Amino acid sequence: MNIIVLRDELVNSLYAVERSVGFGSSLPMLKNVLIRADGPTITVTATNLEFAVIYSFQGKVINSGSISVPFHLLNSVIKNLNSEKLSISVREGNVVDITTDNYNASLHGFDAKDYPIIPSIHKSDGKININIESFTEAIECVIGSTQYSEIRPEISGVFMEANSDSMRFVATDGFRLAEKEISGFHMDLSGLDGIGVIIPLRSVEEIYRLLKTQKEGDLNIFVDQTQILFKTERMEMISRVVDGNFPEYKAIIPKDAAIEAILPRRELMSAIKLTSSFSGKNNDLLFASGENGKFIELSSSDGSVGQNTYRITSKIKGGGFSLLFNWKYLMEGIKIFNTDEVIIGVNADDKPVKIKSAGDISLVYVVVPMKK
Amino acid sequence: MEQQELWKSVLGEVELQISKPNFLTWLKNSQLLENKNGVALVGLPNNFAKEWVKNRYHKIILGSLRNFDSSVKNIDYSVFHQNPLMGQIGVSDKNDEYLGMRLPLELKVDKRTNLNPKYTIDSFIVGHSNELTFAAVQAVIKDVGKKYNPLFIYGGVGLGKTHLLQGAGNEIKKIYKGEISVLYVTSEKFLNDIVAAIRNKRMEDVKHRYRNIDVLIVDDIQFIGGKTTTEQEFFHTFNALYENNKQIIISSDRAPSAIPTLEERLRSRFEGGMIVDIGYPDYEMRLAILKMKIQSQNIQIDDKIVEQIALKVQKNIRELEGVLNKVVFCMQYNNLPMENKKIDEIINEVAQPAIKNVTIQDIIKNVADFFELSTSDLMNRSRKKEIVEPRQIVMYLLRDIMKLSYPHIGERVGKRDHTTAIHAYEKIKNDITQNNQLNQKIAVIKERLFKT
């Protein structure tokens, strides 16, 4: 293999794959990246056997070929080079020469055939085409509502569900749940009514990281029984999906609310942050309606430390309530909206609370109050 | 050679041919899923492993497989999740309470264990009639294979044996998260498997299926009585498991001693373990059961009605449920509140079908058959213990079921005095409360009477 590439392109590619490098694994080869040159396209690949990222760019290919090199070493060299262009060539014995006009390095590479084979999706159950920005926005809305869990892998991720009418992203950790519905996507289903996959949390985080800086462009998503493939113009990421069934979450979302309180979103967020200063170990925050239904009181107290109360005006319909929340869960539910006001729907003191906004029905957050 | 053993041997050979990191990364969690018609199906934990193994190790594995089983001609590869932490049915048994609300469970029977997830230990109502048995089951779950082995549970129809057995299986599955393998079968399935195996010359497979587990649960074992080949095979299976401290749980409609056609060696093995019984539920327990069913199905029903059902329906739990369902249905259909009379009607319809059809002859014959005597034995003057008790039972039943007068009873059972009949009735009535075995025997006889 013998190629000449722009340093910037190489930097971008290493940035794209750096989280996929399999550190600390039993197979040393996973600590490498695979560089392949084919025609005018050069790809850099890394994998940790959970997911793999392949980044492509154009360069000058004098000789096609492939080689794998240790990521750390390559990264260290490329990042610190100050030349605009560099040449990478492989000679006898898998020795890789990196040359610029004032620098040269030889490092020990490894045969490409010892590098893991990246799986692909041969026959997909469905293909979705969606605007990158819509996708990342949706992920942003729900990803804060789930957590890593070894014992409940089926909720340790984001559930992506789509049929010809709508597409939903759902995440939960058993205490709260966020659901975002989006439109503006194209879907091709191979004979199925719809698809539903649970994307593992680490994979979601990674695809989000890779896409969040891109404002434009389309994302193509392919799904089969065991994998999901995200494809953009430059980059591909393939990941396993979680084997299992996502809980029937629709039944959880309260349909109606006996009492509704409309609150100014930004002020509420500040109020939560403020009053949480006095929250005890349980992160508890009392959220109660005031008299006359004209305001809400947030308060917290911690035994000997002290207590505080904040009053916030609100339009309340339907009665009074007094709920105890984990303030972090409540905060997450307010944070993910981008409207001026949020509507908090309450039923009984121990039933799930639904947070939504008047202007945007695509996002719903459900949180269970703590037991008093 | 058995599948798991075979794969272990293959892996052993392959390990020598590839580097250790490669072996650990790609083949450690592999499994031989199937091996039939010359095609082996190898399961890998993820797609990366599948691609790698398929492309790089195919020849080596095929070669090694053929060393042990020359019938293998080709290998297919697929992604197979071991999921020790996640059963096939929502691991989440605690996730009944998800976000504070009840979720519908995925109610598919697990193909590997034959266990139905709807039967759980948590939903099993415990009362006087079954608390000993329940305690024994709990002890077994805690200490699988070491505490009470075999555990023999017997009791009449519709009292919860299957619920308890399957519940135990599900609980063991849940607690030990796949490290302890469980298999639940009815003796009928066992029998069918044996018959099919003999026919298709696959006895080895069946043997291994039933002996390569940690917990074997067999329901309704009484059906293998008299079926010699099945008894034989069960005997060998039993031994194989028992010798290796594998847990065996058995249920039956009666105690081992009361299964007449059961092979002696099997009977003695059952009797060597822990024998417990489940009796008929008392009023409190019936009420509790009804209340739980009502709660789990979110039914609205007047307490008084529930109490009435619990009071009147005294037989088995299945009947209880049946009556409840019918009452609820009528309530919803007619949209009217229920009156006591209507409820009584329903109870009589569902719960007590054909008392009228039982004749004196039926009773005498059934009891005689049960104790393997002839009707003339019961009628004659013999005072032998083995004959006196059945005779007394006949008299008891004639009074209890048919409400005949004592002189009539005495007359019909060998021309005896009415005081004999009185004595017999009182004695058996008393003994039933003291002696569970007797109670069970009579329950079984009664069932047989009403079955025809």
Image (cartoon, grey):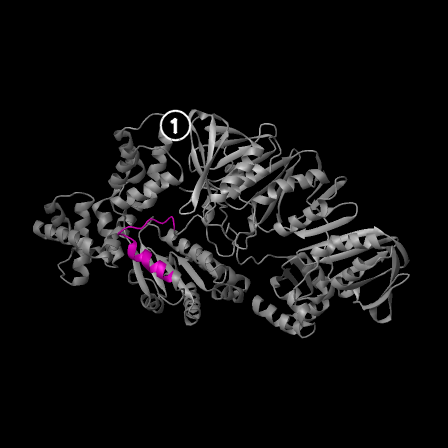
Q: Residue at x 69, y 72 (%)?
A: B19
Taking the magenta stretch, the answer to whether it contains residue A199 is no
Q: Does A85 sit left or right of A79 as displayed?
A: right
- Residue A271, given in percent of the width and then of the height, sits at 52, 36
Q: Position of residue B198 (x, y in %)?
A: 51, 63
Front one among B109 and A94: A94
**Figure quadrant of residue B74:** bottom right
Answer above or below: position of A233 versus A53: above
In which chain is the residue bearing label 1? B
Residue at the spot 12% in from the left edge and 59% down from the top edge: B381
* Number of numbered tags placed on the structure image: 1
Q: Name the residue under label 1.
A: B333
| Helix, strand or loop for disc 1 | helix
Q: Is residue B101 above or below residue A342?
A: below
Q: Is residue B138 magenta?
A: yes
Kind of residue sitting beneath label 1: Tyr
**Residue B283 image point, x, y percent:** 25, 44
| Residue B353 visible in the displayed image | no
Which quadrant is home to the N terminus of chain B?
A: bottom right
Q: Residues within 10 Å of mark 1 (few under 14, many from 20)?
A: few
Q: Going by the image, does B17 lie left or right of B414? A: right
Residue A105 in view in this figure: yes
Q: Position of residue B192 (x, y in %)?
A: 47, 57
Left or right: residue A331 compared with residue B65: left
Q: In which quarter of the image is the C terminus of chain B?
A: top left
Q: Residue furthest bottom?
A: B16
* B19 or A340, nearer to the observer: A340
Q: Which of B389 and B341 is in front in this view?
A: B341
Q: What stretch is highlighted in magenta?
A: B122-140
